């Protein structure tokens, strides 16, 4: 028995000849920020998609909140996904909707009409306050900078108060100052909501700032499982490579 929020056990995932994940295992503990560091193409996004069952593993098992995700029917899977926030690399905001409408979107899917009538306005306002963008409520995504769009995407993720947040390359493509803002927001979210987070990244600064623990994904395996400081001081050439 473990009290892990996510338990990944010896999963394998291939695309044809391309064996991406090889007996990969990991745990995510309650309330922690876990970073997964790996080169481009190492399988980080595939791993995250397997965790929410957007992709099926070939072998191995994944438990989320103690439940084997492969055993859930569509309804239970939907209910589980409502408790998991996913910040896509591409943000995936709806360009034809205002910021408010973008934030209301998950509520329309997961809240009943009564609940929305009572709480939607407040939920949208609070989520926007969390990312310090209350003034953008009536703007269109195209009017916002890349960093602001990322923050709105995060607000939309937070609106359902997820117990798990999966961040896919949250700072990629952002300038260093904006990247730091996003890292600080990730820390703030952890403190405020005590959610467990998985942060997939190759941005060392983001990982240094946000992660309580770091897993290295190398050759499809969980290669190292340490604090950032331990990795930084490692003499292993495969680990040192990331710090050059
Ligand atoms: N839907 C797919 N079909 C075929 N190959 C895929 C698919 N998704 C990912 N891959 C391959 O899996 C490997 C890992 O991809 P990915 O997880 O996106 O890497 P990253 O670590 O950069 O996020 C890559 O070689 C990629 O080409
Ligand atoms: Mg990726």
Image (cartoon, rainbow, N blue to C red):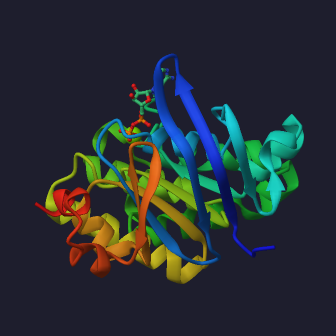
Q: Residue furthest top?
A: 16
Query: Which residue sits at x=39%, y=71%?
Result: 185
Residue 226 in view, yes or no:
yes
Where's ligand 2: which quadrant?
Answer: top left
Residue 23 in the figure: left or right of residue 44:
right
Residue 220 percent coordinates (x, y): 45, 43
Q: Nearer the viewer, residue 125 or 158?
A: 158
Q: In which quarter of the image is residue 243?
A: bottom left
Q: Which of 160 and 243 is in front in this view?
A: 243
Q: Which of 59 and 228 is in front in this view?
A: 59
Residue 55 percent coordinates (x, y): 63, 32
Query: Which residue sits at x=65%, y=61%?
Result: 121
Query: Which residue sits at x=30%, y=40%?
Result: 40
Q: In which quarter of the image is residue 28?
A: bottom right
Residue 137 in view, yes or no:
no
Residue 93 percent coordinates (x, y): 46, 39
Quadrant containing the C terminus is bottom left
Q: Quadrant of residue 236?
A: bottom left
Q: Which of 149 and 242 is in front in this view?
A: 242
């Amino acid at each position: 028995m473990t009290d892990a929020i996510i338990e990944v056990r010896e999963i394998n995932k291939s695309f044809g000849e391309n064996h991406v994940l090889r007996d990969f295992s990991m745990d995510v503990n309650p309330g922690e920020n876990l970073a997964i560091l790996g080169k481009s193409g190492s399988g980080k996004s595939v791993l995250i998609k397997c965790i929410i069952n957007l992709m099926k593993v070939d072998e191995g098992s994944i438990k989320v909140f103690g439940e084997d995700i492969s055993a859930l029917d569509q309804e239970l899977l939907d209910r589980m996904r409502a408790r998991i926030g996913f910040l896509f690399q591409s943000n995936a905001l709806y360009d034809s909707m205002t910021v408010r409408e973008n934030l209301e979107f998950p509520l329309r899917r997961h809240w009943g009409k009564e609940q929305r009538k009572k709480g939607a306005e407040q939920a949208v306002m609070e989520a926007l306050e969390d990312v310090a963008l209350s003034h953008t409520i009536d703007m269109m995504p195209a009017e916002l900078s890349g960093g602001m769009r990322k923050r709105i995407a995060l607000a939309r993720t937070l609106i359902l108060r997820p117990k798990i947040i999966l961040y896919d390359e949250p700072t990629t493509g952002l300038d260093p100052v904006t990247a730091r803002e996003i890292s600080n927001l990730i820390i703030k979210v952890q403190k405020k909501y005590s959610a467990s987070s998985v942060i997939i990244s190759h941005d060392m600064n983001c990982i240094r700032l946000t992660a309580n623990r770091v897993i290295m994904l190398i050759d499809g395996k969980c290669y190292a499982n340490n604090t950032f400081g331990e990795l930084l001081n490692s003499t292993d050439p495969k680990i040192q490579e990331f710090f050059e």
